Image: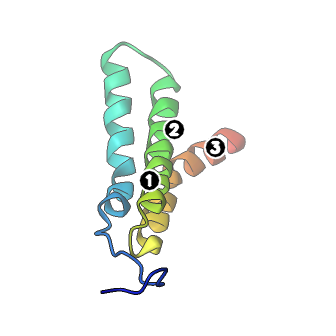
Amino acid sequence: MAARGSAVKRSVVPWLGLCSWLGMVAGVLVEQGARALGATGNSPTAVGVLAAAMWGFCAVLASRVRDERWPWLALAGAAFSTLPLLLFLVAMVLH
């Protein structure tokens, strides 16, 4: 029996931390969906990179709320999912 107010943390399997690495896949699917709906120009790309970044952000936020173990996994996945947005912004500035 654990003592009341003990500092033992609950260890939760980091499913959402792992899902944060799927942001690029979600971004590509959203971009392809926007192109299938008839969007042209840079609009589908912009929507896709924003979807990838938001997927990573929401997954890392949900991971922290669930108090999953290995928080670095979710943070690294969110940073990885944000890379397309960074590249898109750099390309816009340099163009």
Which of the 4 image quadrants contains residue 31? top left
Q: Residue at x 32, y 67 (%)?
A: 14
Front residue (pair 89, 30):
30
- Give neighbour class at mark 2: few <14, some 14-19, many 20+ (Cα, 10 Å): many
Of badges 1 and 3, nearer the viewer stands 1
Question: Closer to the N terminus: mark 1 or mark 3?
Answer: 1
Q: Residues within 10 Å of mark 1 (few under 14, many from 20)?
A: some
Q: Disc 1 vs disc 2: which is toward the camera?
A: 1
Give the Cα separation between the discs numbered 1 and 3. 26 Å
Name the amino acid type tagged 1: Ala
Element class at badge 2 = helix
Q: Position of residue 36 (x, y in %)?
A: 30, 19
Residue 51: quadrant of the picture: top left
Q: Residue at x 49, y 80 (%)?
A: 5
Residue that numbered label 2 is attached to: 50
| Image disc number at residue 90 | none
Q: CA distance from mark 3 to mark 2?
A: 11 Å
Q: Are marks 3 and 2 in contact (CB under 8 Å)?
A: no
- Mark closest to the chain's N terminus, 3 or 2: 2
In whole angstroms, how far apart are the C-alphas of marks 1 and 2? 18 Å
Does dot 3 land on a helix, a strand or a loop?
Answer: helix
Residue at 36%, 75% (x, y): give it: 10
Of residue 51 and residue 94, the one placed in the foreground of this image is 51
Q: Residue furthest top?
A: 38
